Image (cartoon, rainbow, N blue to C red):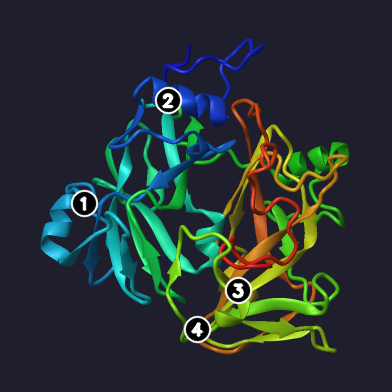
């Protein structure tokens, strides 16, 4: 048994550091290291992460915040909240451009050699819902430090569309990392470019040339060859409300402008607009690795990518294990218009080892909305 009380990976002679698998996450729940105000659903546990659920209340606040070492989130909410909203029953509308803090149903009691890292779910990012995890006495977003014990909170701010959410809605997810007890503050196990090159030689990580820069570099596809002459979508500014739990319930044309390919294979990003684009590369995440989207150097262009960044083991695997899925890119220009060109570097994937391969890979149960994806909007849109 590990210090965290986890069973060792089957067949392993020694304990392994890395990202916990679905089996190990289930063991955390069984051991009471992850508990919740309502029973966890079996589909909350993904191959390498746990879906987190909104609780019964949302608190509207004027601005984002971190509590710092000496305060809890609850203490700050009593000082900063401007409204308290019930999410029970049919839930409530979270207005575009507003900030909310929502206590989550799940809470943690982590040992000293286990930490958590959060990210928006894929569908959350594609709806341009800005969400981050906050913990009591936390000094960083999206991090539950080794040994953290206490409640979890989601900061939620819809940026393009107002959304309806309710208690139990899932906007973000949590990954667990097993640490060496002698180095518990290690926050990442990112593989080096040399290690990635060796892995790619054995099993392809992408279908084309492997570009490495502290991870696998991704390039934007603006050719129009990917999706019948369409290179992306731009969010409309005045739309109806989207229910985050309603799958396949909305027409693309009511929320998105379709962006056709241009002869010059360029796209001009307008400041503040939100775009859904796709990578040139097809990806495949091996069974013993997990990946996360990370930013490129800001000096390469006047844009940022809103990352719903976790890629689970098995994502993108084709029939023969070949790379088969594109990365969907959520892009927003900064303060000036910016020209994107076909093939321009736009993001990178950082890979980490799994503490053990999950028993069921991404998409294996047939429940994945994004396996084999090309240019694809969130699951909420018909025919997207």
| Sequence-first tag of 3 and 2 | 2
What residue would you read off at disc 1? 73
User: Which circle, 4 or 2, is nearer the viewer?
Assistant: 2
Residue 272's disc number: 4
Q: Are marks 3 and 2 in contact (CB under 8 Å)?
A: no
| Sequence-first tag of 1 and 3 | 1
On the rendered image, what quadrant is the C terminus found in? bottom right
What residue would you read off at disc 2? 28
Give the CA separation, mark 3 to mark 2: 41 Å
In the image, 249 versus 321, the foreground residue is 249
Category of crowding for the residue at label 3, using alpha-carbon neighbours closer than 10 angstroms: few (below 14), some (14–19), many (at least 20): few
Give the CA separation, mark 1 to mark 3: 35 Å
Q: Is residue 313 found left or right of 198 in the rendered image?
A: left
What residue would you read off at disc 3? 299
Secondary element at tag 4: loop
User: Which circle, 1 or 2, is nearer the viewer?
Assistant: 2
User: Which circle, 3 or 2, is nearer the viewer?
Assistant: 2
Q: Are marks 4 and 1 in contact (CB under 8 Å)?
A: no
| Sequence-first tag of 4 and 1 | 1
Give the CA separation, mark 1 to mark 2: 24 Å
Secondary element at tag 1: helix
Residue drawn 38% across and 76% down? 96
**Residue 294 in sight:** yes
Percent across and percent down for residue 272 are 50, 83
Secondary element at tag 3: helix
Q: Are marks 1 and 3 in contact (CB under 8 Å)?
A: no
Category of crowding for the residue at label 4, using alpha-carbon neighbours closer than 10 angstroms: few (below 14), some (14–19), many (at least 20): some
């Amino acid at each position: 048994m590990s210090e965290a009380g986890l069973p060792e990976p089957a067949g392993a002679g020694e304990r392994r550091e890395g990202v916990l698998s679905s089996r190990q996450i289930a063991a955390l729940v069984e051991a009471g290291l992850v508990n919740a105000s309502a029973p966890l659903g079996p589909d909350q546990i993904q191959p390498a992460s746990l879906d987190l659920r909104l609780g019964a209340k949302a608190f509207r606040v004027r601005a984002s915040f971190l509590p710092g070492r000496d305060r809890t989130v609850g203490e700050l909410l009593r000082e900063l909240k401007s409204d308290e909203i019930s999410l029970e029953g049919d839930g409530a509308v979270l207005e575009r451009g507003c900030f909310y803090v929502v206590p989550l149903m799940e809470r943690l009691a982590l040992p000293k050699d286990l930490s958590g890292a959060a990210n928006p779910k894929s569908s959350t990012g594609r709806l341009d819902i800005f969400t981050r995890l906050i913990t009591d006495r936390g000094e960083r977003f999206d991090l539950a430090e080794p040994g953290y014990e206490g409640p979890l909170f989601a900061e939620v701010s819809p940026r393009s569309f107002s959304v309806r959410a309710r208690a139990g809605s899932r906007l973000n997810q949590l990954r667990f990392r097993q640490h060496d007890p002698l180095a518990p503050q290690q926050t990442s196990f990112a593989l080096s470019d040399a290690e990635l090159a060796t892995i790619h030689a054995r099993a392809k990580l992408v279908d084309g040339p492997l570009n490495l820069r502290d991870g696998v570099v991704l390039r934007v596809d603006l050719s129009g060859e990917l999706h019948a002459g369409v290179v992306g979508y731009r969010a409309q500014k005045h739309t109806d409300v989207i229910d985050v739990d309603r799958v396949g319930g909305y027409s693309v044309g009511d929320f998105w402008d379709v962006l056709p390919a241009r002869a010059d294979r360029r796209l001009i990003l307008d400041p503040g607009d939100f775009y859904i684009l796709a990578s040139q590369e097809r990806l495949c995440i091996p069974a013993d690795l997990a990946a996360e989207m990370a930013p490129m150097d800001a000096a390469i262009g006047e844009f940022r990518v809103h990352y719903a960044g976790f890629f689970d083991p098995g994502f993108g695997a084709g029939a023969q294990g070949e790379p088969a899925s594109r990365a969907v890119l959520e892009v927003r220009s900064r303060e000036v218009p910016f020209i994107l060109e076909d093939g321009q570097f736009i993001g990178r994937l950082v890979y980490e080892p799994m503490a053990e391969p999950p028993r069921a890979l991404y998409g294996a149960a047939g429940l994945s909305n994004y396996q084999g994806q090309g240019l694809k909007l969130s699951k909420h849109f018909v025919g997207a």
